[in-house]
Image (spheres, helix red, strand yellow):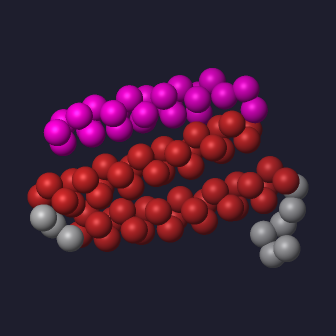
């Protein structure tokens, strides 16, 4: 069952990497980077549940926060605004 989740996440990871590399526009690449962050958080969460180690969940939480902040910063940059606006 867990192997099925990992397989699905690997497929999603490769599709996101393809979209990052071949995306037709910068917003498409931004969305793919955001989805890739969600996939990494999913990997960490599933690994934490399987191994019963809580530091994987801490890594997942930190990664989710950094991914959110990075997405907001990139969206503001693509919009042409400064970070203090």
Residue drawn at point x = 42 percent, y = 68 percent: 62
Give x and y (percent) for residue 83: 78, 69
Left/right of residue 49 with respect to residue 40 in the rendered view: left
Against 23, residue 39 (above or below) is below
Q: Residue furthest bottom?
A: 84
Against 46, residue 28 (above or below) is above
Left/right of residue 38 with respect to residue 26 in the rendered view: left
Against 80, residue 31 (above or below) is above
- Please say whether residue 28 is one of the residues in the magenta stretch: no
Main SS type for the magenta part? helix
- Please say whether residue 20 is one of the residues in the magenta stretch: yes
**Number of marks:** 0
Give x and y (percent) for residue 60: 36, 62
Give x and y (percent) for residue 48: 21, 60
Give x and y (percent) for residue 57: 29, 66
Q: Residue furthest front?
A: 1
Picture quarter with the C terminus:
bottom right
Residue drawn at point x = 59 percent, y = 33 percent: 20
Foreground residue among 51 and 4: 4
Residue drawn at point x = 42 percent, y = 35 percent: 13
Quadrant in the rendering for residue 1? top left
Q: Which stretch did the figure color magenta?
A: 1-25
């Amino acid at each position: 069952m867990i192997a099925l989740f990992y397989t699905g996440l690997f497929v999603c990871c490769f599709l996101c990497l393809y979209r990052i590399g071949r995306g037709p526009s910068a917003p498409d690449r931004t969305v793919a980077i955001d989805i890739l962050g969600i996939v990494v958080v999913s990997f960490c969460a599933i690994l934490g549940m399987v191994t019963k180690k809580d530091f994987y969940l801490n890594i997942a939480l930190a990664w989710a926060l950094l991914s959110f902040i990075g997405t907001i910063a990139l969206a503001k940059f693509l919009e042409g605004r400064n970070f203090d606006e």
